[in-house]
Image (cartoon, helix red, strand yellow):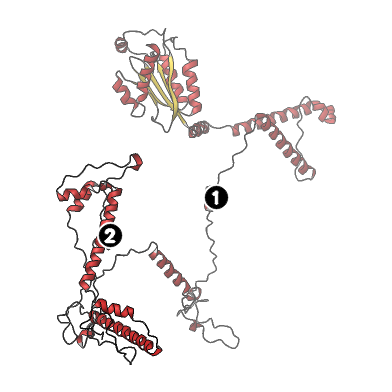
C-alpha cells in the first residue's frame, strides 16, 4: 500500500523536501534516509502493480513487498499519481488514428487537386476552381480513375469469389449506392476471471458477460462460429488413368496358380486330371492304358495338317520394278547376243552327244559343195531330194507363222486392251466447232474415225454451227485432232454415196436450212482441249438440236458449258 501524503503538506513542498534531502555529515543519518527512500519506492511500485492487476483481472490480493523490513516513510514523499482510465486510453487512441487519417488525406489532397473538391460538395459550399498541376504526363489523374476506396483486407465468405469490378465512373456510382457492410467490432481484451464449476467445463461459454459475485459469468451464451464449408476440388488430370495403369500392373505382377491340368494334356486325359496316369511302376514309365492316346477318340491321328501360306502384308504394297526402256539399237544388240548364246549352248550339247545334229540345209546353189560324191553319181536324184527338202522347210515355216498369227477375236481384244491401257494414263476432251457440217462425206469421216479411235462423245447439228465433242486417251485425241484440222478439206464437197445414217439431208431438211449450203467459207476450229476425270458419254452419236436449250440438254450438266464456249468463240473470232 502506498503512503498518503502529509495532511498539512503541499505536493510542491513534498517534492521540494524530496529533492532537498541530502545526506548529513554524519554517516548514520545518511544511510537511514537512503534506506527509507528505497523502501518507499518499493512500496509505490507494489501499489501500482496491485492497482493495475485490479483493473485487469481484479480480486487478487496485492503482492507482498520485496523486503520484510519496511522503513518509515518520510513526510516529504510525493503523492501517488492517478492512473488513467481505460475509456480515456481508448479515446486517445481513436484521436490519434483520426489525426493520422486526416494527415494522410490532406497529403493526398495536396498531391491531387481533384480529391479536395469532393468534400466541399457535402458541406454545401461552392467548390473552388481547381488549378491543374502540370501538363502532359505530369498532369494528376482524375479521382474517378483512382481507387480511393479503402482496401478491404478481410473478405467475407460470400465476397471471396466475386470478380473484380472495373474502375469506371458508372461502376463507382453503383458501388457507392450499394449499402456498405457494417464494420466489424473492435477487438477488446476480455478480462481474465477465475471460473468455477460449469463455466470452466463449458468451452463454448462466451466471455463477454458480466461476472457474478461468485466469479462466474451470468447469462453466458455459446460463442457462434462460422461453419467452414469444404471447397469443391477437381480431380487432377490423369488421376484415373494412372490408377488404371497401376491396377493393370498389379494384375500382371500377380501370378495365377498353376492349373491342375495343362491345356495340351487335357484332351488326352479322360477325367481331366493327372490321376488317370496312376502311380509310376518300377520301370518308371507312365501307364497309358487309361488315356486317350491309343484309343479311337484320340486327337492324335496319322494326318498332318499343312497350314495355308498367307502372304506377307508388305508384299502387296511392293511396287514392281519396271524394265528399263531401251532404244531400238540397244534392243537389236541384246537380241543378237541372246540368240548367239542359245546357238552356242545348242552346239555344245551336240558335241557332247546329248542332241542329234541338225540336217544340212541343202539348196540348189550349194548342192555340189555339200553333196559332192552323190551329186556326181546321180545328179537327178539328188536334185529331186533337195527340192523336196526346200519345199518341206517352206511348209514348216508357213505353218509356224500361221500358228503364231492372231485370230480376229484375239486381234480385236488386243486393240481394246491397248485402248484401255492408253485410257488408264489419262482421259482428255476436245471440242471442235464446224461452221457447216452438211456434206455427207464430212459427216461419215467425223463419225467413223471417232469409232475407230475408240472415242466417246456427241456431234450436235444446229442451224448456227455444228459442235463435235470427243473424249478418250491422249493418243486417240491426237490422231482425231489431226483428222479434223489437217486431213479433211472442209471447203470441198463430195459426190453422192449410198444411203446411210449420215446421208445428205432430205428435201424437208433442205427447205428448213434454205436449200443447199455453200462450203466456200467452211472451216473447223478447236474450241477447247483439256484433261477430264471420267467419261461423260457412253459412245459417240450424232444428234440434231435446233435450239440452244435442246443442245445443252443433250450434252448434259457437265458438258453443257462447251456449247456456251463455242458460241463465245464465234463471237470473238468472226464478229
For label 2, the SS is helix
Mark 2 neighbour density, 10 Å: few (under 14) some (14–19) many (20 or more): few
Q: Quick check: 182 above or below 421?
A: below
- Mark nearer the viewer, 2 or 1: 2
Closest to the observer: 348 or 48?
48
Residue at screen point 68% across, 29% down = 329
Task: Count numbered badges in the picture.
Answer: 2
Visible residue check, residue 162? no
Asked whether, in this view, residue 498 is left or right of residue 405, the answer is: left
Closest to the observer: 51 or 188?
51
Residue at screen point 53% across, 87% down = 279
Closest to the observer: 232 or 144?
144
Image quadrant containing the N terminus: bottom left
Asked whether, in this view, residue 137 is left or right of residue 257, the answer is: left
- Residue at the farthest bottom position: 68
Q: Quick check: 516 above or below 244?
A: above
Q: Quick check: 137 above or below 20?
A: above
Label 2 to label 1: alpha-carbon separation: 92 Å
Report which quarter residue 216 is drawn in. Answer: bottom left
Locate residue 276, reporting x and y percent: 49, 83
Closest to the observer: 274 or 120?
120
The residue tagged 2 is: 100
Asked whether disc 2 touches disc 1, contact meaning CB atoms under 8 Å apart, the reply is no
Mark 1 neighbour density, 10 Å: few (under 14) some (14–19) many (20 or more): few
Residue 445: which disc? none
Visible residue check, residue 424? yes
Residue at screen point 69% across, 35% down = 334
Report which quarter residue 20 is drawn in. Answer: bottom left
The residue tagged 1 is: 315
For label 1, the SS is helix
Amino acid at each position: 500500500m502506498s503512503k498518503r501524503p502529509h495532511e498539512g503538506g503541499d505536493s510542491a513542498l513534498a517534492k521540494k523536501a524530496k529533492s532537498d534531502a541530502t545526506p548529513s555529515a554524519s554517516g548514520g543519518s545518511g544511510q537511514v534516509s537512503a534506506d527509507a527512500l528505497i523502501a518507499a519506492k518499493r512500496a509505490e511500485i507494489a501499489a501500482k502493480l496491485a492497482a493495475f492487476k485490479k483493473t485487469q483481472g481484479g480480486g487478487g490480493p496485492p503482492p507482498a513487498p520485496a523486503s520484510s523490513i519496511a522503513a518509515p516513510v518520510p513526510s516529504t514523499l510525493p503523492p501517488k499519481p492517478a492512473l488513467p482510465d481505460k475509456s480515456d486510453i481508448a479515446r486517445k487512441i481513436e484521436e490519434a488514428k483520426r489525426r493520422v487519417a486526416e494527415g494522410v488525406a490532406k497529403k493526398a489532397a495536396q498531391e491531387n487537386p481533384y480529391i479536395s473538391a469532393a468534400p466541399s460538395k457535402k458541406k454545401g459550399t461552392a467548390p473552388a476552381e481547381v488549378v491543374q498541376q502540370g501538363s502532359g504526363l505530369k498532369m494528376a489523374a482524375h479521382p474517378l480513375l483512382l481507387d480511393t476506396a479503402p482496401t478491404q483486407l478481410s473478405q467475407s465468405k460470400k465476397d471471396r469469389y466475386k470478380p473484380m469490378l472495373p474502375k469506371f465512373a458508372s461502376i463507382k456510382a453503383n458501388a457507392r449506392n450499394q449499402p456498405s457492410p457494417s464494420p466489424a467490432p473492435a477487438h477488446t481484451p476480455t478480462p481474465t476471471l477465475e471460473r468455477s464449476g460449469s463455466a470452466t467445463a463449458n468451452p463454448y461459454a462466451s466471455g463477454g458477460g458480466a461476472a457474478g459475485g461468485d466469479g462466474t459469468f451470468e447469462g453466458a451464451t455459446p460463442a457462434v462460429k462460422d461453419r467452414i464449408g469444404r471447397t469443391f476440388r477437381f480431380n487432377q488430370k490423369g488421376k484415373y488413368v494412372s490408377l488404371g495403369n497401376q491396377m493393370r500392373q498389379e494384375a500382371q505382377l500377380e501370378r495365377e496358380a498353376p492349373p491342375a491340368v495343362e491345356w495340351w494334356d487335357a484332351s488326352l486325359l479322360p477325367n481331366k486330371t493327372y490321376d488317370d496316369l496312376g502311380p509310376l511302376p518300377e520301370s518308371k514309365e507312365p501307364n497309358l492304358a487309361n488315356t486317350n492316346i491309343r484309343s479311337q477318340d484320340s486327337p492324335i491321328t496319322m494326318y498332318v495338317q499343312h497350314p495355308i501360306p498367307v502372304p506377307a502384308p508388305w508384299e502387296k504394297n511392293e511396287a514392281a520394278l519396271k524394265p528399263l526402256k531401251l532404244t531400238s539399237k540397244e534392243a537389236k544388240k541384246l537380241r543378237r547376243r541372246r540368240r548367239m548364246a542359245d546357238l552356242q549352248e545348242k552346239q555344245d550339247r551336240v558335241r557332247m552327244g546329248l542332241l542329234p545334229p541338225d540336217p544340212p540345209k541343202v539348196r540348189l546353189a550349194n548342192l555340189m559343195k555339200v553333196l559332192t560324191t552323190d551329186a556326181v553319181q546321180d545328179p537327178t536324184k539328188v536334185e529331186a531330194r533337195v527340192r523336196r527338202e526346200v519345199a518341206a522347210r517352206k511348209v514348216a515355216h508357213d505353218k509356224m507363222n500361221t500358228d503364231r498369227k492372231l485370230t480376229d477375236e484375239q486381234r480385236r481384244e488386243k486393240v481394246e486392251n491397248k485402248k484401255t491401257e492408253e485410257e488408264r494414263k489419262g482421259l482428255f476432251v476436245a471440242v471442235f466447232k464446224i461452221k457447216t457440217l452438211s456434206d455427207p462425206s464430212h459427216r461419215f469421216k467425223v463419225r467413223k474415225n471417232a469409232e475407230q479411235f475408240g472415242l466417246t462423245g456427241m456431234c450436235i447439228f444446229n442451224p448456227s454451227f455444228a459442235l463435235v465433242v470427243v473424249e478418250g486417251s491422249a493418243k486417240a485425241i491426237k490422231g482425231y485432232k489431226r483428222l479434223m484440222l489437217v486431213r479433211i478439206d472442209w471447203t470441198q464437197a463430195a459426190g453422192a454415196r449410198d444411203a446411210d445414217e449420215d446421208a445428205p439431208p432430205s428435201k424437208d431438211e433442205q427447205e428448213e436450212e434454205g436449200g443447199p449450203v455453200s462450203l466456200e467459207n467452211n472451216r473447223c476450229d478447236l474450241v477447247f482441249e483439256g484433261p477430264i476425270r471420267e467419261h461423260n458419254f457412253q459412245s459417240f452419236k450424232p444428234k440434231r438440236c435446233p435450239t440452244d436449250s435442246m443442245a445443252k440438254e443433250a450434252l448434259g450438266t457437265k458438258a453443257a458449258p462447251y456449247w456456251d464456249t463455242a458460241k463465245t468463240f464465234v463471237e470473238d473470232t468472226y464478229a
